[in-house]
Image (cartoon, helix red, strand yellow):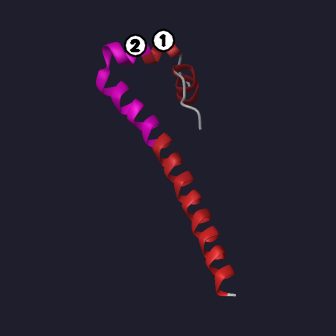
Amino acid sequence: MAKKTKRDMAYHLDVDVSTLYNWRKYKPNLYRIVMLGFKFDELLEQSKKNYEDLLNLDELIKDEIQKFKN
């Protein structure tokens, strides 16, 4: 998943990009919380992908072990 641009974030929040910049300048705590939310979503997606990759690797290893048992 590609990192979201400020434009992507603004679109997702249904605000103008200038609103994000105003939040950053005038409401830094709000801006921080919003950015943490986007980072959380990004890390959650990455964790899901890592989990799926690990499951696939586990299956491959199990298949290899089975080949040697037979």
Three-letter amino acid code at disc 2?
Answer: Asn
Magenta segment, prevailing SS (helix, strand or loop): helix
Three-letter amino acid code at disc 1?
Answer: Ser
User: Which residue in the rendered view is the most extreme toward the bottom?
Assistant: 70
Q: Residues within 10 Å of mark 1 (few under 14, many from 20)?
A: few
Horizontally, is 46 left or right of 62 in the view?
left
Task: Determine whether 37 is above or below 20 in the image.
Answer: below
Q: Quadrant of residue 62?
A: bottom right
| Mark carried by residue 22 | 2
Q: CA distance from mark 2 to mark 1?
A: 6 Å
User: Which residue in the rendered view is the most extreme toward the front?
Assistant: 68
Q: Secondary structure at mark 1?
A: helix
Query: In percent of the image, x 40 and y 13: which residue is there?
Result: 22
Q: Quadrant of residue 8?
A: top right
Position in image of residue 70 (x %, y %): 70, 87
Read off the magenta span: 21-40
Query: In percent of the image, x 44 and y 37: which residue is there?
Result: 39
Position in image of residue 7 (x %, y %): 56, 20
